[in-house]
Amino acid sequence: MNRKKNFVWPLLVLPGVLFVTVFMLIPLFSLCLTSFFPDQTFSLSSYFSLFKDQYFQQTFVRSIRLSLLSTFMCALLGFPSAYYISKYSRHKGMMMAFAVFPMFTSPVVRSFSWMVILGKRGIVNNFLVWSGLFAKPQDLLYNEFSMTVGFVQLFLPQMILALIGVMDNIPDDLTLAAGNLGATRIGSFIHVIFPLSISGLVTGSVLVFTGCMTAYTTPQLLGGTDTRVLATMVYQYAMSLRDWTQASVVAVVMIVCTMAISSIFNSMSRKINPMA
Amino acid sequence: MKKNRLLMVVTALVYVFLIGPLLVIAAASFSETKALKFPGEGFTLDWYKQVLTMSSFIEAAKLSVIIAIAATAIALLLGLPAAYALNRYRFRGKEAIKTLFLSPVLIPVIVLGFIMLRYVVSAYDLEVIPSLLIGHTLLSIPYVMRVVTSSLANFDFAIEEAAGSLGATRVYTFFNVVLPNIKSGIASACIMSVINSFNNVSLSAFLTGPGVNMLPIEIMSYVEYHFDPTIAALATLLMVATLGVMLLIEKTLGLQSVV
């Protein structure tokens, strides 16, 4: 393109570049620097002591475990629904809208709704007692169970939409052809639909997993003091305990974990996906 | 296509799980009982009247709306020229700049809140409102960049050259030729960015100060100590607003364009 006008583009990108650099990039570098150079010299001591800390170990493992479990549940529930919406439903637009609606609704409202449902006098406990399964109301709230339920409801729409995105691109002819060649409906699902949907499954899983690893509202409202996760731990260290050194180290661990897991998922999808 | 009953039942259950809890709150907001419960008893609109008189919620809601709109506007001012330059000109380091603009979405928002507090707000001794504005602008920039870049990718820059050869100035062409062609992209970017900013908790939790609160934070601190139908009424009002926005999107842009 025109060489003479090449002086224009720096003026156009500069304000934004400066803004992101000053308010995010430099703070991010400072965060890493201070956590790796606690006393002006390079040292991993903050990380060693963090990973030796039993409270952190439990929190770290809990974050990973709940995120993996929620991702698995979202895949399990999302796959059949997305398949139904993409290939069978006559009200696709409306079904998509109903998946988007909770996504647009505040996470505070959505977590709060589970406080109403799973509480001691909530509808679930009423049912458990009424049906005679339990003699008295159970503790369904402020534990890993309620957190997982909250996470799954929070991120399931993302999984469903990611899956519908790829399933819409699978031509119906493929399943018809498989049927003509003698495949059962389940057979053509396993050998045709599933392999072609894996890229959507991976995209959805990355969204759900990183979402669960970094979500703050849901664990704060639906978790208890003994079921903290990394996000609530960063907040606790930074705001309640005012221990910014410790908060920084946990924050860096969070960044590294989410990035590592998403790149593992993505490279996995490249290996599995027959279309790539 | 043939019907598949099993799939239909599973999908129906999944949707009950997704939407049901929200309907439960809406139903509970009309209950006459003091304690929040479902199913409720009787029917009253008192909780709605009460919530509309609680100045802490009203003030917080106002601030949330103002910050969401202002931050989106700033993000647009910063992002639109950059997106245009990235699509229009060829230069070195383009990919790096694009990644930089999208990077706020790669950092966990809770971490973004913490580093904003430690290295920006404390370092420059910022007031609450400017800090919220800067933080929320960071949240909005990737939304604006992603959507505007993809609408510009579909724009044929030959049209711009045609306008130029007919005597239009660059600036005139941008506002009268380029902008009208990408306005629906800009609109959907703005809507997504406003919703995202309005619902944000992790960032605001670090940046709000005494007496200055954003609505989601105000609700969170309220439900820690109270469990009454006022919050259900407020939640229902928010859901009605969400539905309104969705209908508006569907009528103007089509929902497909924003998700």
Image: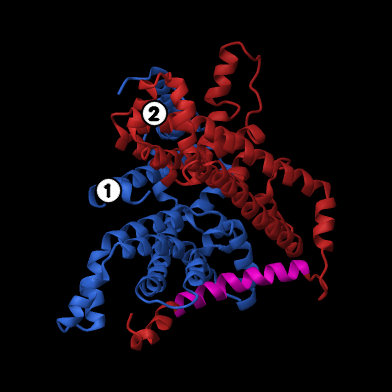
Estimate the x, y position of residue A17 in percent, counting from the top left.
49, 75
Q: Is residue B233 visible?
A: no
Q: Can residue A26 be seen in this view?
A: yes
Q: In which quarter of the image is the N terminus of chain B?
A: top left
Q: Is the magenta stretch mostly helix, strand or loop?
A: helix
Q: Is A65 displayed left or right of B220 in the figure?
A: right
Considering the numbered disc 2 on the image, is that residue within a helix, a strand or a loop? helix
Give the chain coloured red: A
Report which residue position mark 2 lands on. Answer: A84
Which chain letter matches label 2? A
**Is B126 a magenta residue?**
no
Q: Quadrant of residue B68?
A: bottom left
Q: Is B249 displayed left or right of A248 in the figure?
A: left
Q: Which of marks 1 and 2 is in front?
A: 2
Q: Which residue is drawn at 26% across and 76% down?
A: B174
Q: Residue furthest top?
A: A132
Q: Residue A40 carries which label?
A: none
* Number of residues whose C-alpha sits closer than 10 Å to that of mark 1, classed few (under 14), some (14–19) or many (20 or more): some
Q: In this view, does A161 lie above or below A180?
A: below
* Magenta extent: A14-36
User: What type is the residue that disc 2 sits on?
Assistant: Tyr
Estimate the x, y position of residue B92 in percent, counting from the top left.
48, 77
Q: Residue B254 carries which label?
A: 1
Q: Which residue lies furthest to the bottom in this view?
A: A4
Chain B shade: blue
Q: Residue at x 65, y 57 (%)?
A: A255
Task: Tell me the CA gap for discs 1 and 2.
Answer: 22 Å
Q: In which quarter of the image is residue A12?
A: bottom left
